[in-house]
Image (cartoon, helix red, strand yellow):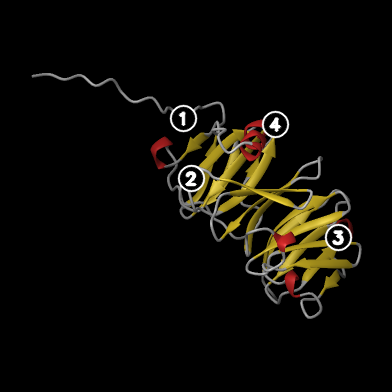
Amino acid sequence: GQGTGAIYIDAHNDLWVSTSSGDLLRYADAKLSQPEVFSAGSKPCVQRIASFAPSTQGLWFGTRGYGLGHVEGRQVTCYPPNDKRAGPFASIASLLSLPDGSLWIGGQPGGGLVRRRHNRFVHVALESGADTIGAIVYQDNKVWLTTSEHGVFRTPLAALEAAADSDSQPLDLQHWSSSEGMDNQVCTTGSQPGGAVDSGGRFWVPTQLGVSVLAPWTQPNKALPEVVLEQ
């Protein structure tokens, strides 16, 4: 047998699986019968896939060290790290595509987030600095971001868009880390899915010490306690 990396079910109910042998498999209608195979021998970028996201005409995927890729039908297009259409990341841990055609990307080197729109890339820095963004999950006009060192962030999509459009626009971030009760703030990065929202609106995130479950209605308290000096 062979190991699996990132997995994804698309809008047509097809199951996509990246494998340890470097091939990409597509199981039609999520039926685990004979899969369609996209071989790394002809398209190196299908190796070491870490993340998937739908596009208007197919499927985006991010890789560990091979840049960005896209598949439409049987056609695979590779955008290697030295291709300006791939953006600044050689390794792409997370992807989020939106109906307007924009693609949000988390990766390395450099960390943070990048928005790809009309082949133009804009970097958005986060409080977590150079952390890898392990998952970008959209739910109810909010975006959840898991990081490799500093826990989980949540922000309105509109705030992310404003930060990408203006360098001076501060991000409105809700933050969970060890200080807010997470058993471990080192989130698992490198294979999709790296986080998910359940039917009750809670966010589930894998960490080095298991799984943390976060409730967005429990706003982390950033207020400092009142200082009282006694002599």
Quadrant position of the C terminus in the picture: top left
Residue 139 image-quadrant placement: top right
Give the CA distance from mark 2 to mark 3: 35 Å
Judging from the image, what secondary structure is the residue with disc 1 in? loop
Residue, disc 1: 220
**Mark with earlier residue (1, 2):** 2
Circle 4: residue type:
Asn
In the displayed structure image, the side of residue 18 where residue 215 appears, left or right: left
Disc 4 is placed on an element classified as loop
Left/right placement of residue 16 relative to residue 136 reads right
Q: Which residue is mark 4?
A: 141
Q: Which residue is mark 3?
A: 31
Residue at the disc numbered 2: 151
Instruction: Please tell me which of labels 4 and 2 falls first in the chain.
Output: 4
Check disc 2: other Cα within 10 Å, few if <14, some if 14-19, many if 20+.
many
Foreground label between 2 and 3:
2
Report how far apart the C-alphas of labels 1 and 2 lie in the structure: 12 Å
Q: Secondary structure at mark 3?
A: loop
Name above or below for residue 183 compared with residue 227: below
